[in-house]
Image (tube, rainbow, N blue to C red):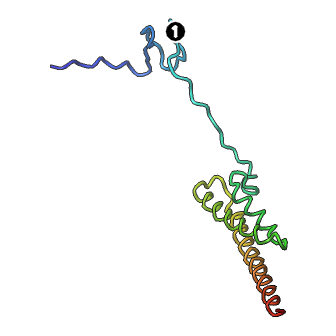
Amino acid sequence: MGIEPPNPPPPGVIFCTKCGERNNENNFKCTRCESLLHGEPPPKYVAEDSGLGALIPYKNTQALLAYYLGIFSIIPCLGSPMGIAALVLGIRGLRFAGAHPEAKGKVHAWVGIIAGGFFGLIYTAAIIFGVAMAIAKKQANH
């Protein structure tokens, strides 16, 4: 007793919403009024990786920075802050690589964690030891 829905168009047929003309569903524009039958197709993006992403993880900046900071944390005096920064960025880069595998950079993050953690710890301990020795020497002289 209710209202029956209109018959659906046969397969491969689409009707113009502006003038009602019957068109092939592959048509981009109406054959009568030339209005668009379909919306603009979404742009196609092709994710291309030339293999450079594995060598230099440019999509994982934190891992890349951790790597370089970890390597340069060998430098005395700068090793402590660079090592700590490399450790933190390495952990963050490792998490990012786990969440976004296409970004790569796990090896770079691990280099930052290991080298930065090691040299950061060594130089921080050396600084603390040096300060403690200076204080002890100063107190011994008084």
User: Residue at 67% of width from left, 65% of height from top?
Assistant: 88
Closest to the observer, 64 or 135: 135
Q: Position of residue 66 (x, y in %)?
A: 73, 63
> Amino acid type of disc 1?
Thr
Above or below, 131 against 21 in this view is: below
Above or below, 79 against 99 in this view is: below
Q: Residues within 10 Å of mark 1 (few under 14, many from 20)?
A: some
Q: How many marks?
A: 1
Q: Identify the residue position indicated by label 1 in the image.
A: 31
User: Residue at 71% of width from left, 54% of height from top?
Assistant: 61
Callout 1: SS: loop
Above or below, 117 against 36 in this view is: below
Which image quadrant is residue 91 in?
bottom right
Quadrant location of the C terminus in the rendered image: bottom right
User: Residue at 82% of width from left, 67% of height from top?
Assistant: 72
Which image quadrant is residue 1 in?
top left
Left or right relative to 2: residue 103: right
User: Residue at 69% of width from left, 51% of height from top?
Assistant: 59
Closest to the observer, 92 or 98: 92
Q: Position of residue 120 (x, y in %)?
A: 74, 73
Closest to the observer, 71 or 77: 77
Q: Position of residue 69 (x, y in %)?
A: 77, 64
